[in-house]
Image (cartoon, grey):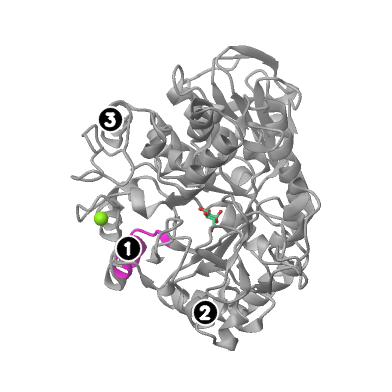
Amino acid sequence: MESELGKKIIYQIYPRSFYDSDHDGIGDLRGIIAKVPYLKKLHIDMIWFNPFFVSPQKDNGYDIADYYQIDSRFGTMADFEELVAELHKNKIDVMLDMVFNHCSTRHPWFQKALAGDKYYQRFFYLRSAKPDGSLPTNWQSKFGGPAWSRFGHTDKYYLHLYAPAQADLDWHNPAVRQEAAKIVNFWRKKGVKGFRFDVFNVTGKAEQLVDSTDRNTEKQLYTDTPVVHRYLRELNHNSFGQDPTIVTVGEMSSTTVENSIKYTQPKNHELSMIFTFHHLKVDYRQGNKWDSVPFDFLQLKKLLFEWQTALDQAQGWNALFWNNHDQPRALNRFGDPIHYREKSAEVLATAIQLLRGTPFIYQGEEIGMTDPNYQQITDYEDIETINAYHELLAAGRTPTQAFNAVKQKSRDNSRTPMQWTDDKFAGFSTVKPWLLPTNQATINVADELKNGEIFTYYQRLFKLRKTEKLVYQGHIKPLWQDHPQVMGYLRYLDQQQLLVITNFYGQATTINLPAAFAAAKSQILLSNYQRQQLPTNKLTLAPFEALVLKLNSSSFF
Ligand code: GLC
Ligand code: MG
């Protein structure tokens, strides 16, 4: 199974922004069907779709009101079935996004609870105010403001770790856990082969919810607690675990190495892999997302390798990624989109994709899409962005400071429409899209396929991953850990070795090659500079150069 997982490439589609087939400014399922030939060119194995279930869209579909139906903005169940069939014809499987920590307050469960139904009231965290009249706990919502809102006209409050429109489900209640398994099984019957579990490690709240004493450690009260493992094993047993070919990934913010191992060790029967986020916080000042600093390269490497080596030793498994719909584009954060857009996109791809685990790429990454250049707060749509902007103002930042802070970190940075052409609306739609593209004149699929090099580089990387055992199955050993510009590592297995070298900066730099690799003893498997020959022992890397070498096995003996 490990080698099977290691051969898979998972592409993420944000349906709202992929392709609009019915001219309403919002991407849809038929739009995705129309682009299957494009997807096929990439040789991906599975597509993770962000939620397109019935939802009031207060958090772009992460507030689900019906887990069994397609939201009419995106299409119909018939469209979904056709999409699955079309993808299967092209050997691409489907991964759906299961949002089980919370549901929409429009969901019948919550509506029935509001109407007084005791059975459904037990689906949620309903609590009374404290004797002094203050909220049940002092917790903050992740999107700003308190984590409690008034439960209808009663004297109770309901918990929402996210927006008030997203009520937390009480996983202590076995009925909630059974509903979750039922939903997974429903979609399995439709041919779905993958599941992503949204913010799953905040399901493990204590029975007694207590005040936090410190804002910075507050989330430890409900994040990554031991009971999450039990919930996962039960869900696995009652649903996806019944089919060994199913691929699962849990979104595990603020997890630990130890828990990452537990979640993914095959013998534990929890998940195939997890997303962790520590490596994407290296441009936060003291952990504050809205306070950016240049990224800490040594820290980035340290975190990635800490997880890589620990999971390798314990048969855990990583999901490998830079981008998703919650992150600004990695190219803007860790690359140089102005001077070296193509080369730095390739360096990022090489560095992450050849690690041990299963790579995920996010729509547009394969053509080197970058953050939009918005000028005012009204250009943004995301609830977290808008709330953060107002909180920053309230905390005393000037409008320009607040705007610049959200401009760098807004989740909308990655949610802009896929840029198919250089048209006014980027070939995404014939009408004004829900979010505007700003740089399609220079970055778009049509140009990339004609003149670009990033897309073909990804194709070569994917091919390497699928054909080279060292990549899909090898162990990992970090190299040059203290080097200020180079991220490099060995993948090794059965006396064979593969060496990945990437220069993360726009200046050339020189490294010493490991002895065995120097002097014609190795072959070049991949190079983003068309390098043909290797110098002996000292290697000077060009700006944003990526190089993959394999030791000729004969040189070992
Ligand atoms: C996850 C999703 C994010 C969403 C949140 C609440 O982090 O990726 O988009 O807002 O969960 O469901
Ligand atoms: Mg549409």
Q: Secondary structure at mark 1?
A: helix
The answer to whether the residue bearing label 2 lies less than 8 angstroms from the nearest atom of ligand 1 is no
In front of the other: 200 or 239: 200
Q: Label 3 near label 1: C-beta < 8 Å?
A: no
Picture quadrant where residue 199 is located: bottom right
Which residues are drawn in magenta? 80-93
| Closer to viewer: mark 1 or mark 2 | 2
Q: Is residue 554 magenta?
A: no
Q: Secondary structure at mark 3?
A: helix
Question: Along the horizontal axis of the image, is 460 left or right of 521?
Answer: left
Look at the picture and state if 509 lies above or below 233.
above
Look at the picture and state if 381 lies above or below 54.
above
Return the x and y of residue 84 as percentages of the image width and height. 35, 66
Q: Identity of the amino acid at label 1?
A: Lys
Q: Identity of the amino acid at label 2?
A: Leu
| Closer to viewer: mark 2 or mark 3 | 2
CA distance separating discs 2 and 3: 53 Å
Q: Identity of the amino acid at label 3?
A: Asp
Identify the residue at horizontal 45%, vertical 55% (top origin).
45
Q: Which mark is residue 447?
A: 3
CA distance separating discs 1 and 2: 45 Å
Which residue is identified by label 1? 89
Q: Which mark is residue 114?
A: 2
